[in-house]
Image (tube, rainbow, N blue to C red):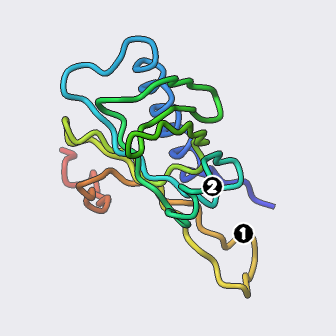
Amino acid sequence: MSREIDYGNLMHQAMRSLIQDVLSDVSKNGLPGAHHFFITFDTQHPEVDMADWLRERYPEEMTVVIQHWFENLNVTDDGFEVTLNFGNNPEPLSIPYDAIQTFVDPSVEFGLRFETQDMDDDEEDEDDEEAPMAEDVPQKRPEAEVVSLDQFRK
């Protein structure tokens, strides 16, 4: 069995750690300047905890905004909890990092998107599975190009 470096999962771990660091700072010091976040998450994730009426309204995914009014932002190694206002109705949410699909701070044009590759029911071999892909939002980075160094040698 050959061992490979799982860059997709390593990248996801690094990106989730970045989100944790940002939210931890905000929980301690508040939002600086014009910073605010749009966070889209999978409402079907088994560890998402939210009011039944919100889950019924958003059966697949939901985007929340952390900007003007939020309370009780508690950040852990697994996710975060926050109380947000939905039509003058404060509701607590518990969102694991694994449920996050996008994290965007439009004030500085920064964003992360977590993508997964859905496999057919006839999965061939576990070794053939592709790791989840991650890319910056809103811009896509160009494909990497391999350049021969021979042209630079004297």
- Residue visible at 53% across and 46% down in the picture: 12
Say which element carries label 1.
Answer: helix
Residue that badge 2 annotates: 52
Q: Is residue 14 left or right of residue 32?
A: right
Amino acid type shown at disc 1: Asp
Picture disc at residue 127 = 1
Q: Secondary structure at mark 2?
A: helix
* Image side of residue 1 versus residue 16, left or right: right
Instruction: Tell me the residue at 72%/85% (across/down).
Output: 121
Q: Nearer the viewer, residue 145 or 100?
A: 100
Q: Position of residue 144 (x, y in %)?
A: 32, 58
What distance separates the C-alpha of mark 1 from that of mark 2? 38 Å
- Expressed as whole percent of the image width and height from the top left, the position of residue 79 reads 60, 35
Q: Quadrant of the N terminus?
A: bottom right
Q: Residue at x 65, y 84 (%)?
A: 120
* Crowdedness near tag 1: few (<14), some (14–19) or many (≥20) residues, C-alpha within 10 Å: few
**In the orientation shown, which residue stands out farthest toward the bottom?**
122
